[in-house]
Image (cartoon, grey):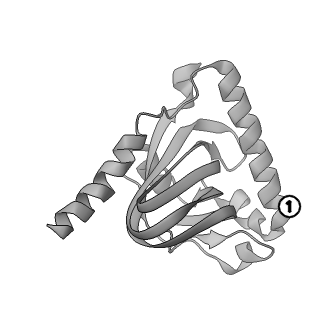
Protein backbone atom coordinates (compact mmCIF):
# COMPACT_ATOMS: atom_id res chain seq x y z
CA UNK A 1 0.00 0.00 0.00
CA UNK A 2 2.75 2.49 0.97
CA UNK A 3 4.81 1.80 -2.16
CA UNK A 4 1.81 2.40 -4.43
CA UNK A 5 0.99 5.65 -2.58
CA UNK A 6 4.57 6.88 -2.98
CA UNK A 7 4.67 5.92 -6.65
CA UNK A 8 1.31 7.59 -7.29
CA UNK A 9 2.46 10.82 -5.64
CA UNK A 10 5.67 10.91 -7.65
CA UNK A 11 3.88 10.24 -10.90
CA UNK A 12 0.86 12.49 -10.37
CA UNK A 13 2.47 15.66 -8.97
CA UNK A 14 4.05 16.69 -12.30
CA UNK A 15 0.70 16.19 -14.03
CA UNK A 16 -1.01 18.56 -11.62
CA UNK A 17 1.56 21.13 -12.73
CA UNK A 18 1.21 20.19 -16.40
CA UNK A 19 -1.74 22.54 -16.79
CA UNK A 20 0.85 25.28 -17.00
CA UNK A 21 1.78 25.99 -20.61
CA UNK A 22 5.35 25.43 -21.76
CA UNK A 23 5.48 28.50 -24.00
CA UNK A 24 4.35 32.02 -23.08
CA UNK A 25 0.98 32.81 -24.66
CA UNK A 26 1.74 36.23 -26.16
CA UNK A 27 4.61 37.88 -27.99
CA UNK A 28 5.02 40.29 -25.07
CA UNK A 29 5.28 37.39 -22.60
CA UNK A 30 7.84 35.66 -24.84
CA UNK A 31 9.88 38.88 -24.91
CA UNK A 32 9.77 39.17 -21.12
CA UNK A 33 10.87 35.55 -20.78
CA UNK A 34 13.78 36.14 -23.19
CA UNK A 35 14.90 39.16 -21.14
CA UNK A 36 14.70 37.06 -17.95
CA UNK A 37 16.76 34.26 -19.52
CA UNK A 38 19.34 36.76 -20.86
CA UNK A 39 19.72 38.29 -17.38
CA UNK A 40 20.02 34.81 -15.84
CA UNK A 41 22.79 33.82 -18.27
CA UNK A 42 24.63 37.11 -17.65
CA UNK A 43 24.44 36.50 -13.89
CA UNK A 44 25.78 32.94 -14.24
CA UNK A 45 28.72 34.10 -16.34
CA UNK A 46 29.50 36.88 -13.84
CA UNK A 47 29.27 34.60 -10.78
CA UNK A 48 31.48 31.92 -12.32
CA UNK A 49 33.69 32.84 -15.30
CA UNK A 50 34.78 29.17 -15.52
CA UNK A 51 31.30 28.41 -16.94
CA UNK A 52 32.60 29.68 -20.31
CA UNK A 53 33.70 26.15 -21.14
CA UNK A 54 30.08 25.00 -20.99
CA UNK A 55 28.56 27.93 -22.86
CA UNK A 56 31.21 27.67 -25.58
CA UNK A 57 31.45 23.91 -25.81
CA UNK A 58 27.86 22.71 -25.68
CA UNK A 59 25.43 21.83 -28.43
CA UNK A 60 22.65 23.65 -26.56
CA UNK A 61 21.48 24.58 -23.08
CA UNK A 62 18.15 24.87 -21.28
CA UNK A 63 17.94 27.84 -18.90
CA UNK A 64 15.28 28.11 -16.18
CA UNK A 65 15.69 31.47 -14.38
CA UNK A 66 13.09 30.84 -11.68
CA UNK A 67 11.82 27.50 -10.40
CA UNK A 68 9.48 27.60 -7.43
CA UNK A 69 9.48 24.60 -5.11
CA UNK A 70 7.42 23.76 -2.05
CA UNK A 71 6.29 20.83 -0.04
CA UNK A 72 4.87 19.31 3.06
CA UNK A 73 5.24 15.51 2.77
CA UNK A 74 4.21 15.81 -0.90
CA UNK A 75 6.16 18.36 -2.87
CA UNK A 76 6.26 19.93 -6.26
CA UNK A 77 8.20 22.44 -8.31
CA UNK A 78 7.62 24.25 -11.57
CA UNK A 79 9.51 26.68 -13.78
CA UNK A 80 9.62 27.90 -17.37
CA UNK A 81 12.67 28.42 -19.53
CA UNK A 82 14.20 28.37 -22.97
CA UNK A 83 16.34 25.98 -24.97
CA UNK A 84 19.11 27.85 -26.79
CA UNK A 85 22.11 27.05 -28.96
CA UNK A 86 25.64 27.59 -27.62
CA UNK A 87 25.62 31.01 -29.32
CA UNK A 88 22.39 31.93 -27.49
CA UNK A 89 19.92 31.57 -30.37
CA UNK A 90 16.44 30.55 -29.23
CA UNK A 91 15.49 27.00 -30.22
CA UNK A 92 12.34 26.61 -28.16
CA UNK A 93 10.46 26.94 -24.90
CA UNK A 94 10.61 24.41 -22.11
CA UNK A 95 9.34 23.83 -18.63
CA UNK A 96 10.32 21.69 -15.70
CA UNK A 97 8.05 20.06 -13.18
CA UNK A 98 9.10 18.07 -10.19
CA UNK A 99 7.20 15.79 -7.88
CA UNK A 100 8.47 14.31 -4.64
CA UNK A 101 7.27 12.52 -1.56
CA UNK A 102 8.94 12.06 1.80
CA UNK A 103 10.09 14.10 4.75
CA UNK A 104 9.97 17.67 3.45
CA UNK A 105 8.67 21.03 4.51
CA UNK A 106 9.17 24.56 3.24
CA UNK A 107 9.61 26.42 0.02
CA UNK A 108 12.40 27.72 -2.14
CA UNK A 109 13.14 29.38 -5.43
CA UNK A 110 16.16 28.66 -7.61
CA UNK A 111 17.44 28.80 -11.17
CA UNK A 112 18.70 25.84 -13.16
CA UNK A 113 20.75 25.48 -16.31
CA UNK A 114 21.28 22.23 -18.18
CA UNK A 115 24.03 21.96 -20.79
CA UNK A 116 23.75 19.36 -23.55
CA UNK A 117 27.14 18.30 -24.84
CA UNK A 118 25.85 16.45 -27.92
CA UNK A 119 23.08 16.77 -30.46
CA UNK A 120 21.76 13.39 -29.27
CA UNK A 121 21.42 14.62 -25.67
CA UNK A 122 19.60 17.73 -26.91
CA UNK A 123 17.28 15.64 -29.11
CA UNK A 124 16.45 13.43 -26.13
CA UNK A 125 15.45 16.58 -24.23
CA UNK A 126 13.38 17.90 -27.15
CA UNK A 127 11.70 14.53 -27.60
CA UNK A 128 10.41 14.45 -24.03
CA UNK A 129 12.58 11.47 -23.11
CA UNK A 130 14.74 13.44 -20.70
CA UNK A 131 14.25 13.38 -16.93
CA UNK A 132 16.49 13.90 -13.94
CA UNK A 133 16.27 11.70 -10.88
CA UNK A 134 16.47 13.97 -7.86
CA UNK A 135 19.05 16.75 -7.93
CA UNK A 136 22.00 14.75 -6.71
CA UNK A 137 23.86 15.39 -9.98
CA UNK A 138 23.32 19.16 -9.90
CA UNK A 139 26.15 21.50 -8.89
CA UNK A 140 25.64 24.93 -7.31
CA UNK A 141 27.01 27.80 -9.40
CA UNK A 142 29.68 29.69 -7.48
CA UNK A 143 33.12 30.95 -8.39
CA UNK A 144 35.13 28.09 -9.86
CA UNK A 145 32.35 25.48 -9.89
CA UNK A 146 32.41 25.18 -13.68
CA UNK A 147 36.10 24.33 -13.65
CA UNK A 148 35.65 21.25 -11.47
CA UNK A 149 32.61 19.76 -13.23
CA UNK A 150 32.36 17.72 -16.39
CA UNK A 151 29.54 16.25 -18.44
CA UNK A 152 27.91 13.02 -17.28
CA UNK A 153 26.11 11.17 -20.02
CA UNK A 154 26.31 14.23 -22.27
CA UNK A 155 24.63 16.49 -19.70
CA UNK A 156 25.81 18.94 -17.01
CA UNK A 157 23.32 20.46 -14.55
CA UNK A 158 23.83 23.57 -12.41
CA UNK A 159 21.60 25.12 -9.73
CA UNK A 160 21.77 28.88 -9.26
CA UNK A 161 21.16 30.84 -6.03
CA UNK A 162 18.61 28.83 -4.06
CA UNK A 163 16.52 31.22 -1.95
CA UNK A 164 14.24 30.15 0.89
CA UNK A 165 14.31 27.18 3.20
CA UNK A 166 13.46 23.65 2.17
CA UNK A 167 14.21 20.79 4.51
CA UNK A 168 14.00 17.63 2.50
CA UNK A 169 14.71 13.92 2.55
CA UNK A 170 12.43 12.80 -0.23
CA UNK A 171 12.23 10.75 -3.40
CA UNK A 172 11.32 12.41 -6.67
CA UNK A 173 12.57 13.67 -9.99
CA UNK A 174 12.29 16.34 -12.64
CA UNK A 175 10.35 16.02 -15.90
CA UNK A 176 10.76 18.41 -18.83
CA UNK A 177 8.49 19.53 -21.67
CA UNK A 178 9.57 21.29 -24.86
CA UNK A 179 7.87 23.34 -27.58
CA UNK A 180 9.71 24.58 -30.69
CA UNK A 181 10.07 28.35 -31.12
CA UNK A 182 9.35 27.98 -34.84
CA UNK A 183 5.74 27.15 -33.96
CA UNK A 184 5.30 30.80 -32.93
CA UNK A 185 6.83 32.47 -35.99
User: What residue occupies the far left of the structure in this picture?
Assistant: 1
Q: How many marks?
A: 1
Q: Determine if residue 123 is in view.
A: yes
| Picture layout, residue 146 above or below residue 174 | below
Horizontal side of 169 relative to 159 (left or right) equals left
Which residue is at 69% across, 81% downward?
A: 148
Seen from the viewer's position, the closer of residues 89 and 174 is 174
Is disc 1 surrounded by few (<14), some (14 to 19) or many (20+) residues within 10 Å?
Answer: few
| Image quarter hosting the C terminus | top right
Horizontal side of 5 relative to 25 (left or right) equals left
Where residue 24 sits in the image (x, y, percent)?
Answer: 58, 28
Seen from the viewer's position, the closer of residues 13 and 130 is 13
Residue 99 occupies which quadrant of the picture? bottom left
Where residue 157 sits in the image (x, y, percent)?
Answer: 58, 65
Which residue is at 24% across, 56% downward?
A: 8
| Picture layout, residue 45 above or below residue 81 | below
Amino acid sequence: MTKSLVLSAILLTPFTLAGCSTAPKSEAARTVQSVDVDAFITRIKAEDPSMKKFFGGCEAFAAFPDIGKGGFIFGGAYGKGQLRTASGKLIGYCDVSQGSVGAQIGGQSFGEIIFFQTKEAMQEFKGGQFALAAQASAVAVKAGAGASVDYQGGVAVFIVNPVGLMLEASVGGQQFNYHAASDFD
